[in-house]
């Protein structure tokens, strides 16, 4: 029993899980002891891994601040200027980090992997003549654009987003986390010239509390004043540019681009959003068919176009990164909470008075969902944000589909 | 390719990429440091976590490793040592200093408390396991702890571990056996070892 032989036997046993058959009884006894010790270490793996994952985001932010400070104190060091540093962590898409959503538990952390709380302050932009859609308090909004400017304001960043429908100012606060096509990224990924998609709800103070700001290299449609349409004879095949849904979830507007590149804005009803948001976390860039209202002055209908409808998939430059959402089957409703189950486990979602519940497609009313067990067994899609104080997922929009609905895959990754 | 997406293989292309990354890191290229952080944070954290009882302490040490590395990168010679081995060296020194400071402050109550807090959400068995393992690991050398961390926490292959530790594969096999034997002895001396796995 030489050391080399023991090394070899152990290595083989570690690879296969079994002591090699040619080991002598003495060797076998020794290797089994060592295997047991290795199992003891492996049992600690989950704890160490969880610690690494949970600390990654904080450590990243700390290192990023360190790099920025170093760059600032290094006069003339152009290669590590703050703007360059700010670009760094935007490139760190390879790793997967789970923010510390301990109170929600692992399943939610996994399911909403990249959920971030982002507060976007629209500084009077909604009333700006430069904007095409008049947004109101309580509106749920999805918009896209290019960052035109970033300015540090204390711990926050003031970001101006040039969207196809106008210029909006946004403040990304301390609690902000962001994502790209694949994973979460740091706020330093926000830089002039990059394209973003975001969603959120306009508060009473004119603040858009965004659920997600998603960064991606996609081409934003040209900026132009969308032409309002209140009536039409024929259906129009189009691509969604921007959406807003009213506070009660009953109506809204969609800005779309037709195949000739012209932008239009049409009123739509809650059912249209129901179909859209149940299917996609991010409706921006999706191909749709806009159908005229059944009666004059009514809402337009929207059908989501699929490849089976003969629609060409969007070319890569037009694909947008996904926004945060959770899908699952409702297993319990209690005290303003929905308990969902999906492949990641059980997820608790908090409903608030401002949560839009879109369930007409399955013949349910919002109160059926909140007050009764009517939603149990149905598949729901929830867009929302994490409350940083309670770590709970607060639903902005809940769409309810039939229990037989297979959750649709989100848009493919690039 | 490592599980973190980092290029860690010993192929000519892998070495060339490492060399290029090291060159850019020496120029304090922020992008290169971002890549290094993403690629090596977990393993540095795991190593620190192995040596310390608290997750917060490990996070602090792991973060410090990259700050110290950035400041002292002028002294780093890629030809001599792989980047990760250099980072582990820094981690080792920082942990040593940290433990020394704790020792000066007083009894090691802090370490014990840290151990429990890490495992708090888990079962009592896990808490005990972590506690006993943590205590047993303290009896191992730095290299023994590192090889166990890389092989069984990071799930690295022998070849990959050899690259990270700047050793031969045979040396790693020998080291891992000695590390497991030492751990087994330590565990046998503890309550955990006497009672067997829970």
Image: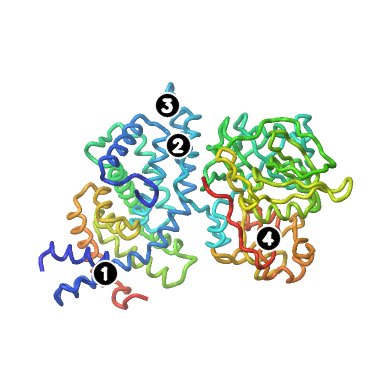
Q: Of the numbered discs in the image, which one, if any, rests on residue A350?
A: 4
In this rendering, the answer to whether B190 lies above or below A357 is: below
Viewer-nearest of labels 2 and 3?
3
Q: Which residue is mark 3?
A: A79
Q: Of the numbered discs in the image, which one, if any, rests on residue A66?
A: 2
- Which of the 4 image quarters holds residue B133? bottom left
Report how far apart the C-alphas of labels 1 and 4 lie in the structure: 46 Å
Q: Residue furthest top?
A: A76
Chain hosting mark 2: A
- Its colouring scheme is rainbow
Mark 1 Cα shell of 10 Å, populated few (<14), some (14-19), many (≥20): many
* First along the sequence among labels 1 and 4: 1
Q: Given this view, does label 1 or label 2 mark the residue nearer the observer?
A: 1
1 and 4 marks on the same chain: yes
Q: Residues within 10 Å of mark 2 (few under 14, many from 20)?
A: some
CB atoms at circles 4 and 3 under 8 Å apart?
no
Label ID, residue A411 = none
Q: Nearer the viewer, residue B116 or A112?
A: A112
Pointers 1 and 3 within a single chain: yes
């Amino acid at each position: 029993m030489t050391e080399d032989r023991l090394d070899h036997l152990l290595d083989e046993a570690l690879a296969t899980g079994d002591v090699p058959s040619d080991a002598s009884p003495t060797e076998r006894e020794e290797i089994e002891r060592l295997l047991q010790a290795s199992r003891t270490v492996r049992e600690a793996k989950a704890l160490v891994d969880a610690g690494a994952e949970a600390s990654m985001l904080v450590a990243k932010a700390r290192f990023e601040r360190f790099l920025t400070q170093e760059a600032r104190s290094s006069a003339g060091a152009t290669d590590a200027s703050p703007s360059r540093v700010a670009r760094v962590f935007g490139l760190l898409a390879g790793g997967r980090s789970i923010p510390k959503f301990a109170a929600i538990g692992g399943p939610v952390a996994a399911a909403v992997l990249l959920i971030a709380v982002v507060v976007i302050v629209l500084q009077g932009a909604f009333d700006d003549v430069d904007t095409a859609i008049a947004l109101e308090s309580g509106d749920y909004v999805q918009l896209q654009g290019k960052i035109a400017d970033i300015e540090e304001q204390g711990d926050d960043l003031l970001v101006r987003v040039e969207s196809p429908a106008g210029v909006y100012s946004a403040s990304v606060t301390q609690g902000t986390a962001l994502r790209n096509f694949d994973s979460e990224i740091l706020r330093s990924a926000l830089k002039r010239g990059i394209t973003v998609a975001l969603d959120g709800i306009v508060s009473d103070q004119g603040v858009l509390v965004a659920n997600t700001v998603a960064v991606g290299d996609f081409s934003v449609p040209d900026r132009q004043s969308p032409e309002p349409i209140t009536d039409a004879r024929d259906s129009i095949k189009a691509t969604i540019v921007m959406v807003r849904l009213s506070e009660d979830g009953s109506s809204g507007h969609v800005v779309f681009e037709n195949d000739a590149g012209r932008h239009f804005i049409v009123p739509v009803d809650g059912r249209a959003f129901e179909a859209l948001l149940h299917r996609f976390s991010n409706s921006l860039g999706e191909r749709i068919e806009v159908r005229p209202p059944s009666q004059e002055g009514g809402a337009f209908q929207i059908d989501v176009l699929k490849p089976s409808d003969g629609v060409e998939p969007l070319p890569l430059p037009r694909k947008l990164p996904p926004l945060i959402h959770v899908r699952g089957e409702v297993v319990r409703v209690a005290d303003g909470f929905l308990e969902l189950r999906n492949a990641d486990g059980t997820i608790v979602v908090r409903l608030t008075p401002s949560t839009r519940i879109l369930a007409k497609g399955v013949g349910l009313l919002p109160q059926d969902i909140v007050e009764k067990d009517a939603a149990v067994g149905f598949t729901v899609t929830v867009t929302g944000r994490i409350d940083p104080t309670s770590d709970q997922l607060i639903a902005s929009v809940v769409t309810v589909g039939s229990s037989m609905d297979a959750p649709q895959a989100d848009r493919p990754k690039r | 390719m490592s599980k973190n997406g980092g290029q860690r293989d010993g192929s000519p292309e892998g070495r060339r990429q490492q060399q290029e990354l090291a060159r850019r890191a020496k120029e304090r290229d922020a992008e290169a440091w971002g890549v290094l952080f993403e690629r090596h944070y977990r393993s540095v954290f795991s190593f620190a976590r192995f040596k310390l009882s608290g997750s917060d302490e490990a996070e602090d040490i792991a973060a410090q490793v990259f700050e110290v590395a950035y400041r002292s990168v002028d002294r780093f010679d890629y030809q001599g040592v792989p980047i990760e081995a250099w980072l582990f060296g820094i981690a080792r020194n920082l942990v040593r200093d940290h433990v020394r400071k704790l020792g000066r402050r007083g009894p090691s109550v802090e370490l014990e408390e840290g151990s429990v807090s890490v495992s708090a959400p888990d079962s009592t068995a896990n808490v005990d396991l972590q506690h006993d393992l943590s205590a047993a690991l303290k009896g191992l050398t730095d290299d023994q702890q590192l090889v166990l961390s890389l092989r069984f926490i990071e799930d690295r292959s022998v070849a990959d571990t050899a690259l990270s530790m700047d050793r031969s594969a045979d040396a790693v096999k020998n080291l891992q056996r000695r590390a497991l034997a030492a751990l087994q002895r330590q565990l046998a001396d503890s309550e955990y070892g006497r009672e067997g796995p829970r």
